[in-house]
Image (tube, rainbow, N blue to C red):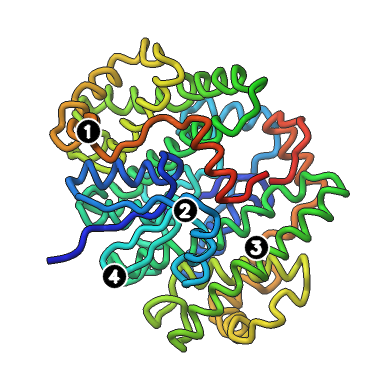
């Protein structure tokens, strides 16, 4: 019997959250090791398990995978969430690339000054409503199907739902003007594995707070000012 | 007979160069459209060709693909440069993503102010020699094979070759201390498709100059 995947990261969203989403949506239970001290991190570095000296790292199927995208690609492929052929995979990759760019604008958000947070919030909402949400609304409109690719649940749907919820945390009516995305959100949220992940007590992490920022800065010795992208 | 892939970008390296490398390494001929004005970019956006109003754009096999990784993954998969199974693909992805982080520093370099250039070269040199090149030196040493993954030519080898040459343009002696990578570079240079790409007259673009930077700023309105 295969061991559960083990996720190495901070106790917070960051770059690991999309991986938690995908594993949960695939119905895969996993364990987590949370980085809390500099000593712990240095020990990990010295043990050689972090190929480029970075986290996230996921132990899965005998591999110690790093690089968020490599990890996500592997999980999607393994659990049949990556389309049925090369062309569907290309579409999924393209759509995930967009939601990744969008959520990427929020990665540094917890580390910003109060003033920069206001600016970045407006920037991300503007990008979401003028560039990204219209693109996905159009995809759904053009084929009229329930899922983004191949009339079947895929990684692209899970990633888009994550992005939608993240944006709504910044602006609760971010989806106004996007009726198909509103229906999509309801539909994907009610898929049993995803519904479970969205309920309290799951491995889903809350919005990053000052304690998270403090931990990351301490562990990574990252004491410089973070500017918005 | 299927059409050649068509690449739409600026006449320069930028985010399209890795795609040119991979197609060339796979022995695939392609056409290129070079944008020169912002109006051309906006028109493409209005046509619906650009899903996120961004370049690169590659038209291939009836698809209008954007997002570099999506394009590169498709090409790698189509031309059998993506390993033989999920695990080999994971290794290739991991290597390519790491190299891509290094290439990001090179990509941003032309746009940094003159006073920051020396520091940025030092950063590129440090990251290459302390974080990235040691990993691939070790991989090649441990398995003793010619290629990074599965004893077979893959996307990872092409990407590493591109990165080595790009860093060497900034830091000529960067491979001293990496004998496996030196041998790797020689082997890759002698592969027929890569050899052809490295010769004058190929679609390979020269290092970015002021003209390129000005064109990018104008077309993408980065001011």
Specify which label sits upstream in the sequence, 1 or 4.
4
Asked if disc 2 and disc 4 are in contact, CB closer than 8 Å, the reply is no
Q: What chain does mark 3 sit on?
A: A
Viewer-side label of 3, 2: 3
- Residue B148's place in the image compared with A175, above or below, is above
- Helix, strand or loop at mark 3: loop
Asked if disc 3 and disc 2 are in contact, CB closer than 8 Å, the reply is no
Q: Which residue is mark 3?
A: A204
Depth check: A99 or B3 in front?
B3
- The picture quadrant where one finds residue A136 is bottom right
Q: Which mark is residue A5?
A: 2
| Residue A218 in sight from this viewpoint | yes
Picture residue at 52% right of the left edge, 19% below the top: B126
- Residue A98's place in the image compared with B10, above or below, is below
Q: Which residue is mark 4?
A: B62
Q: Residues within 10 Å of mark 2 (few under 14, many from 20)?
A: some
Q: What chain does mark 4 sit on?
A: B
- The picture quadrant where one finds residue A118 is bottom right
x and y, in percent, of residue B157 in the image: 28, 36
Specify which label sits upstream in the sequence, 3 or 2.
2
- Helix, strand or loop at mark 4: loop
Marks 1 and 4 sit apart, C-alpha to C-alpha, by 32 Å
Q: Residues within 10 Å of mark 4 (few under 14, many from 20)?
A: few
- Residue B212's place in the image compared with A71, above or below, is above
Marks 3 and 1 sit apart, C-alpha to C-alpha, by 39 Å
| Residue A49 in sight from this viewpoint | no
Viewer-side label of 2, 1: 1
Asked if disc 3 and disc 4 are in contact, CB closer than 8 Å, the reply is no
Viewer-side label of 2, 4: 4
């Amino acid at each position: 019997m295969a061991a559960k995947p083990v996720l190495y990261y901070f106790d917070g969203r960051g770059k690991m959250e999309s991986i938690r989403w995908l594993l949960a949506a695939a119905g895969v239970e996993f364990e987590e090791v949370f980085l809390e001290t500099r000593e712990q991190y240095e020990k990990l570095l010295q043990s050689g398990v972090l190929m480029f000296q970075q986290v996230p790292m996921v132990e899965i199927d005998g591999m110690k995978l790093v690089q968020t995208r490599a990890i996500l690609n592997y999980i999607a492929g393994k659990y049949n969430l990556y389309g049925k052929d090369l062309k569907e995979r290309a579409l999924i990759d393209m759509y995930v690339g967009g939601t990744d760019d969008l959520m990427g604008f929020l990665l540094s958000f917890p580390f910003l000054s109060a003033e920069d947070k206001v600016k970045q919030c407006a920037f991300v909402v503007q990008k979401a409503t003028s560039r990204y949400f219209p693109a996905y609304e159009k995809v759904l409109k053009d084929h009229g199907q329930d899922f983004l690719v191949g009339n079947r649940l895929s990684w692209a749907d899970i990633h888009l739902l994550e992005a939608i919820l993240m944006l709504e945390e910044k602006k609760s009516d971010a989806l106004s003007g996007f009726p198909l995305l509103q229906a999509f959100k309801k539909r994907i949220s009610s898929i049993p594995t995803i519904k479970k992940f969205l309920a309290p007590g799951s491995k889903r992490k809350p919005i990053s707070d000052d304690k998270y920022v403090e931990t990351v800065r301490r562990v990574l010795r990252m004491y410089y000012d973070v500017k918005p992208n | 007979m299927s059409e050649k892939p068509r690449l739409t970008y600026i006449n320069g390296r930028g985010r399209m160069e890795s795609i040119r490398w991979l197609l060339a390494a796979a022995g695939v001929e392609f056409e290129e459209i070079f944008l020169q004005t912002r109006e051309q970019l906006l028109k493409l956006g209005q046509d619906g060709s650009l899903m996120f109003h961004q370049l690169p754009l590659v038209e291939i096999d009836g698809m209008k693909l954007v997002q570099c990784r999506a394009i590169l993954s498709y090409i790698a998969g189509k031309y059998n440069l993506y390993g033989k199974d999920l695990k080999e693909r994971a290794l290739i992805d991991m290597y390519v993503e790491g190299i891509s982080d290094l290439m990001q520093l090179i990509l941003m370099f032309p746009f940094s102010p003159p006073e920051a250039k020396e520091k940025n070269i030092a950063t590129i040199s440090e990251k290459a020699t302390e974080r990235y090149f040691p990993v691939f030196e070790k991989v090649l040493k441990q398995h003793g094979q010619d290629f990074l993954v599965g004893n077979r030519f893959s996307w990872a080898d092409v990407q590493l070759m591109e990165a080595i040459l790009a860093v060497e343009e900034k830091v000529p002696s960067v491979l001293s201390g990496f004998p496996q990578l030196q041998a790797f570079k020689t082997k890759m240079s002698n592969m027929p498709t890569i050899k052809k790409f490295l010769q004058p007259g190929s679609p390979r673009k020269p290092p970015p100059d002021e003209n390129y930077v000005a064109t990018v700023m104008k077309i993408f309105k980065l001011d």
